[in-house]
Image (tube, helix red, strand yellow):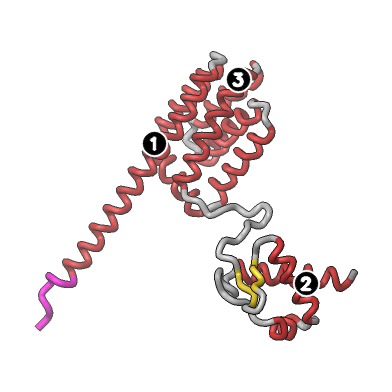
Amino acid sequence: MAEQRLFHTIAEQLSEMIEKGVFPAGSRLPGERELAERFDVSRVTIREAEIALQAVGRIEIKTGAGVYVCEEQPLRPGKLPDVSAFELTEARSLIEAEAAGLAAKLMTDETLERLRELLAEMETPDDAVSTAADKQFHALIAKASGNRAMLHTIETLWRMREELPAVKRSYEAICDDDVTARSREHKDILDALEARDPIAARTAMRQHFLRLISSMLDVTEREELLKVRQRATESRQRFLTPADE
């Protein structure tokens, strides 16, 4: 039993080293003897750890050629994938639109009243309050869909929005960019839900995300133009400024 726990521990440590780049994708792991000395365990324990890692797709054991780190690594349970703000918003437009369509048919008066309250909170000047209300608005619609798998998926997408630094920055930039549009779009979603109209609810939610993608493209374009101007200014200063005599 102790030996079994030990090879699990070694497998976990090797996994962490692979994730940190100590053993990069495609690289060859050190031999059993070297790893056994490094971790102060038997070669049998190393072999068992490598078999366990191969089973989950971390490494590939090539008979006669050694052990190699797989180019494509599986995600740890709960670990978020590295996605762009555009990819995330595209996924949200597809999934949350369908959630809104389902929710429209199941919407209760109590849920609608809470959505009205959240819409009012979204229009406050306090960014923290507004963002929290925005999240609750979408979460409540997802819950009202009656589909727990869809709710879990949407909650995970929101984790990406909040926990992936680059995505979070992109969303903050566009939220500051057009507060009025966000409020109007959420009002359209609420109107469709109040009408218990699945098609209108689905369309309003999708339009909301299409506008977000468009705003992201505008922000990206402005940032790239700013970089181009900055490089041009630096070039002028370097090549067109007369040298001191």
Distance from Cα at disc 1 to Cα at disc 3: 25 Å
Residue 18 placement (x, y as % from top left): 62, 69
Secondary structure predominantly adopted by residues drawn in magenta: loop
Give the residue at mark 2: 48
Alpha carbon separation for disc pair 1 and 2: 56 Å
Q: Which residues are magenta?
A: 238-245
Which residue is denoted by mark 3 in the rendering? 112
Q: Which residue is mark 1?
A: 178
**Amino acid on which the number 2 mark rests in the picture:** Glu
In the rendered image, residue 27, in percent from the top left (x then y), is placed at 56, 74
The residue shown at (70%, 66%) is: 53
Report whether 168 appears left or right of 102.
left
Q: How busy is the neighbourhood of tag 3: few (under 14 within 10 Å), some, or many (20 plus)? A: some
Whether residue 213 sits left or right of residue 112 in the image: it is left
In this rendering, which labeled residue sits more in front, label 1 or label 2? 2
Residue 240 percent location from the top left of the image: 12, 70
Which residue type carries mark 1? Asp
Q: CA distance from mark 2 to mark 3?
A: 56 Å
Earlier residue among tags 1 and 2: 2
The amino acid sitting under disc 3 is Leu
Report the quarter where the C terminus lies.
Answer: bottom left
Q: What residue is at 80 percent from the left and 81 percent from the top?
A: 42
Toward the viewer: 4 or 186? 4
Which of the 4 quarters of the picture holds residue 180? top left
Which element type, helix, strand or loop, lies under badge 3? helix
Judge whether residue 244 is colored magenta: yes
Provide the secondary structure element on which disc 1 rests: loop
Residue in the foreground of this view, choosing between 226 and 19? 19
Q: Residue at x 41, y 42 (%)?
A: 174
The residue lying furthest to the top in this view is: 195
Residue 44: image x %, image y %?
Answer: 80, 78
